[in-house]
Amino acid sequence: MNNAERNLDLVVKEIADEMRQRTDRGEVATYIPELANVDAKAFGIAVIDAQGNVAAGGDSDTPFSIQSISKVFTLTIALGMIGDRLWRRVGREPSGNPFNSIVQLERERGVPRNPFINAGAIAVTDVIVSGHQPREALGDILRFMQFLTNDPSIAIDEDVAASEKRTGFLNTALANYMKSFGVIESPVDYTLGVYFHHCAIAMSCRQLAMAGRYLAHGGRNPSTGLSVVSAERARRINALMLTCGHYDGSGEFAYRVGLPGKSGVGGGILVVAPGKASIAVWSPGLDKSGNSHLGRIALETLTKRMGWSIFG
Amino acid sequence: MNNAERNLDLVVKEIADEMRQRTDRGEVATYIPELANVDAKAFGIAVIDAQGNVAAGGDSDTPFSIQSISKVFTLTIALGMIGDRLWRRVGREPSGNPFNSIVQLERERGVPRNPFINAGAIAVTDVIVSGHQPREALGDILRFMQFLTNDPSIAIDEDVAASEKRTGFLNTALANYMKSFGVIESPVDYTLGVYFHHCAIAMSCRQLAMAGRYLAHGGRNPSTGLSVVSAERARRINALMLTCGHYDGSGEFAYRVGLPGKSGVGGGILVVAPGKASIAVWSPGLDKSGNSHLGRIALETLTKRMGWSIFG
Amino acid sequence: MNNAERNLDLVVKEIADEMRQRTDRGEVATYIPELANVDAKAFGIAVIDAQGNVAAGGDSDTPFSIQSISKVFTLTIALGMIGDRLWRRVGREPSGNPFNSIVQLERERGVPRNPFINAGAIAVTDVIVSGHQPREALGDILRFMQFLTNDPSIAIDEDVAASEKRTGFLNTALANYMKSFGVIESPVDYTLGVYFHHCAIAMSCRQLAMAGRYLAHGGRNPSTGLSVVSAERARRINALMLTCGHYDGSGEFAYRVGLPGKSGVGGGILVVAPGKASIAVWSPGLDKSGNSHLGRIALETLTKRMGWSIFG
Amino acid sequence: MNNAERNLDLVVKEIADEMRQRTDRGEVATYIPELANVDAKAFGIAVIDAQGNVAAGGDSDTPFSIQSISKVFTLTIALGMIGDRLWRRVGREPSGNPFNSIVQLERERGVPRNPFINAGAIAVTDVIVSGHQPREALGDILRFMQFLTNDPSIAIDEDVAASEKRTGFLNTALANYMKSFGVIESPVDYTLGVYFHHCAIAMSCRQLAMAGRYLAHGGRNPSTGLSVVSAERARRINALMLTCGHYDGSGEFAYRVGLPGKSGVGGGILVVAPGKASIAVWSPGLDKSGNSHLGRIALETLTKRMGWSIFG
């Protein structure tokens, strides 16, 4: 362990300690009943640097529901399948609205603003489902996650998926609304089934940070050398995460943390420091924009102490 | 001139050549009559690296109306005056709407989404005007531009200011609308007068790139060592430019160019490559989002050839 | 036949003749595929006065899909079931938006503006379904129509219902959206099934005019003396028809025709001249607001010639 | 005095008594400071039947600021000047939004939904101003009011007009916004000056009921026989009052009162019972839609007791 590694290790441990002691934790999401069962005091962090060193702290090995973070990976898959034709079905602009807003869909005739709001992620999922049985599409997504992490144990939490399916009236509304404009091609039930399931993938911070390494390193896993996407595509996915990755708190996240990332209502956030590290944090309590409250604070601290902001 | 400098110089010249030959140029803004008189074929570029070397091409010394680019500098001044209290009057989120939309103002009770849409920049200008005569406030802004560029010749194009004042009904609507919610404190005429005038500052690419150096280099001019803002504030202004700097084309700009920047309807764009360079381009033809068409393409080419994207 | 009856008869015949000769007919609705099969040149009219005299012209005995006109009758039933508690679930204001807009639902947290836009009518249908099997609820609605018309032959066009169910993604979106706010209580499939079926009831102008008589005559059928609703409730339903009965063309209809009414995308319009007559017209071609083009013109002519406007 | 007259007189007196005893009075408008000085307990009512008999009660001779009620009369004047060409500049549909909303103006490119929301009334005023000095236009409006009431004492409350001008930022925003779309032709200051002044006309219930008689009686004053507008135009203005006359409470007013009318934030309401009477009430406390709370209740009671609803 050299100085830089030692320093990173130290900073990560400090942050885990500081977060453990904080009493402000935000509110655990309750709109998916199964998510409400989580331990509100959990906090985990894992950082993997360019050399593959892992600095971890807190509950970094506890699996949690990655929820919207899965949208980064389904976007990657869909771009691999149909390339830039994807952008006929979904935009690339921040939404300026809550994650589940249906208003812009009306104004823009069923084409969601970006792939990271719910409607956009459903449209992206529909591309993956196209012509397949839901089970096959879901298998593809899961295998991709297992490939990225080199971990065949990654699985879907069926209880969360079932809970979301039972209560996902808003997503059902969004999907049917897009279907009415022809933006969704598969049967709505197929696409939504796959969507609910990939949001219910359970991963730990360590696994998630491993999965995000290709985005931090020009599209390739720097340890194995395996290429996932081109360097340009990695950059572009990062740009989308920066402008759109945190719902209606994306500007705030860029302002405070200064790194591209994607949050989920399960309390996880995946963040990329280009050329330097892939980072995952988890704390279930959310702020009013639906992003992990302590997760965001931990990342702000990490970026500042490591000097990792992409903005100078 | 070392290799890196020679390379930058070459790339900039190439780009100026390529842009001169393109026939797609977008549409020159006509909503401010005086702006429509500009030469649609003009193209200029200037890049100033960390060492202060200037690589320039095309009409890099022709002054043009900086328009909304001035919002970066008024934001800097207002933050210097009242610090984070500014954020009570203006948000930090991308708007997801055209630059002149009044809709979000209604939903958010007169508080604009960010300092770079028109409403937000008017609210920022109001902070600068506060308690002063318009002439004094305008003097402060102009002196700040002259200080940043070390060039006392920078001036306001009074014809453009007068033209904008005569036809600026939409901005007058926005200002009165915010006033009705108490977000504007000075007389509307004062604040708008200063706003129209600072948008009418005329600068060349070379001057503009010089003015933006503090944002590229941790808040300081690396040649003189003079500090303009703290490193953290420079990073944060960069973050705001990235998420909100190009109206409803901000996501697209981040996706393609990958650098923080701010555009104006005069056809200029100021861009920052943190730690590396301050860049200004100018071409009057605009795309449908109101950003310089060739300017954006030139910047996309520059970032790619120099490997300057902040996203990896 | 006295003079007044003779005059009404004459006017109705004239109108049927004039409409037959017009070449402007609007566009037949195609969004429900089964509706597109109708004869675009059809035109029917039936007027029943206070004494029960029927003046009819054109295709007044051809059954057509009453579509949204059914909303007047389901509103009557739901008010009979739960009275003014209905207004907790649906408003009484014109929407200022197209009939299928989802925007206001977001702003008003799932409570539709009025019972005559799609979302509102679905919420009203949900009240009727409450605690029942769809088949039972539908039976109640159908029996009410048969009672009003004293005609047991009135039936649902199952092809239209099936066609609407297959393609009703927008209504499915609206229903799920309201369900997400708790405004819909029954399973979405139940409520939508009943909704699609009652919209698919087929009736002729003569039957429809008969069904509307209680609204024209203080809540009672003046021929049989049977009371359907109180006089006050009849007045209030008429007021709702006037302000909200024609989607985003309600103001225009009041301005031109001057009588309360309800249109359907099948091309029918039911209109009430309080104290004087119940009127039904049918012509499948629609104007841009989704109301029967010739139907509206026929009604404007009828009101003018008979002096029946409620506005003086 | 015959029985009918005696009955009307009695009902009006009863209502004045009942209203005096109520303690629920709504909130007096404060957004125009001068309006807030009024006596919150004031209540007046005046009814003029077809024969010209006046039944009055309470403060029926106290002048109050008619505010938006003036929009009925400016609409009448503008229609007299340019006829149906007026409808190119303003629509005829209910807005489904608060009276001062700017949102629909954006969606509909500066054309207000109807002549009774603020934006629409400003556009109508602009027609009257067209080519004239504000003083002349205002003189025309005032003379029209004096002609309708046969009362040369009717005047503008200059304090209210000045107060509104000083604080009317929202209306200034609306006017400039429409100007940016070319919907306003005169200088904004001219049009707004006239608008603020005609809203500040002061009239008593008795005068107002007199002014509205032409709308109740086919466009003519039934006592003098003088024609103001055609019978058709009177009907159409009545239709507009019914669908749009009470801001976002228009549906509710039609539902409860069942007569065309126009309210103002000064607490007055002018109502028309076609063929029967012209009615004015006044009570300064407003409900949440901005309509007189007791005024609406008094009118609901009057219509019910007199059986005057146009809906049966």
Image: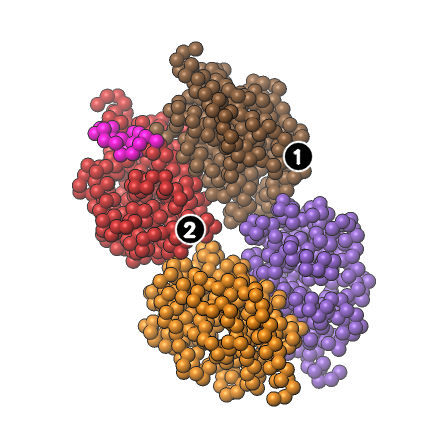
Chain colours: A red, B brown, C orange, D purple
10 Å neighbourhood of mark 1: few (<14), some, or many (≥20)? some
The chain holding disc 2 is: A
Q: Quadrant of the C terminus of chain D?
A: bottom right
Q: Which residue is mark 2?
A: A110
The chain holding disc 1 is: B
Q: Quadrant of the N terminus of chain D?
A: bottom right
Q: In this rendering, does residue B213 appear at all?
A: no
Q: Which residue is mark 1?
A: B163
Q: Position of residue D70 (x, y in %)?
A: 70, 60
Q: Quadrant of residue A87?
A: top left
Q: Position of residue A209 (x, y in %)?
A: 26, 35
Q: Is residue D207 above or below residue B77?
A: below
Residue in the picture at 39% in, 68% down? C160
The amino acid sitting under disc 2 is Gly
Prevailing SS of the magenta stretch: loop
Closer to the camera, C312 or D103?
C312
